[in-house]
Image (cartoon, rainbow, N blue to C red):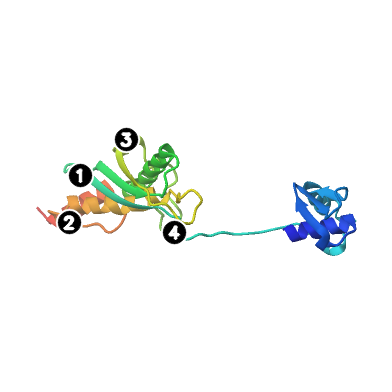
Amino acid sequence: MAGQLKDVAADLLEASAADIELARGTARVRGDETAALPIPELARVVHFQAHRLAEDLRYSLEARATFDPPGTFSNACHAAMVVIDPGTCAIRLHRYLVVEDCGVVINPVVVDGQVRGGVTQGVAAALLERVCFDPEGQPVSATLMDYLAPTAAEMCPVDIIHLQTPSRFSETGAKGMGEGGTIGAPAAVLNAINDALSDTDVRFDHIPVLPHQLSAALACAEGPT
């Protein structure tokens, strides 16, 4: 970008690019304080008065850069405890614990909110949200009566413990936050369900686990009465 600015300034000031220096927001001819142009003026000319420039300098003021650092995602460990009603087969969370590490915690309130929001999203995937299709492939989960979204009523308090391992690849030592809440929750809840069913022959390897599915599985496991 600095080289492009010098080329544009040299063309407008009728000087050599080697004699142009950038300082205090201006491009000027070295040794001549009067021969100077503000850098915003250079940008304006390049994009809105390109006819004043040589052909190869028109619309040329552009710079692109990317930075994709490794190791800036968060990590977490989830533990869930569920209670299953033996009569209705309703599954409810009883306790939930997250130990997460998003590096340096800059705003604890925001981080805790992201963890709890992510856990809620993952719990919904494990217990509520299901997309169904008819034999022709048309979606039949068309409303929130069919596709159940989580509310506060379905959640228990989420206990959070923060570890802080600073990232070496960010200025603040912080890492991305969303992964620490969402990814572990479905597996943690599914494992908790299977643990609660450990005295039966029923196991689930899919989500969501819905009450009618659990009731049918238990009935098949018990056999005819």
Q: Which residue is mark 2?
A: 220
Q: Residues within 10 Å of mark 2 (few under 14, many from 20)?
A: few
Q: Is residue 188 left or right of residue 34?
A: left
Mark 4 burial class by Cα count in 10 Å: few <14, some 14-19, many 20+: few
Q: Residue at x 41, y 37 (%)?
A: 109
Query: CB of mark 3 within 8 Å of CB of mark 1?
Result: no
Provide the secondary structure element on which disc 3 rests: helix
Q: How many labels sit on residues?
A: 4
- Residue at which label 3 appears: 153
Name the kind of residue labelled 2 in the image: Cys
Element type where label 2 sits in the image: helix
Front residue of 40 and 89? 40
How far across and how far down the image is residue 149, in percent? Answer: 39, 42
Depth check, mark 4 against mark 3: the one in front is 4
Quadrant showing the N terminus? bottom right
Relative to 156, is 135 on the left or the right? right
Q: Residue at x 36, y 37 (%)?
A: 151
Eye-nearest disc, 2 or 4: 4
Q: Seen in the image, is 8 located left or right of residue 117?
A: right
Which residue is disc 4 drawn over?
Answer: 71
Q: Amino acid at mark 4?
A: Gly
| Mark 1, other Cα within 10 Å: few <14 / some 14–19 / many ≥20 | some
Residue for badge 1: 84
Element under label 4? Answer: loop
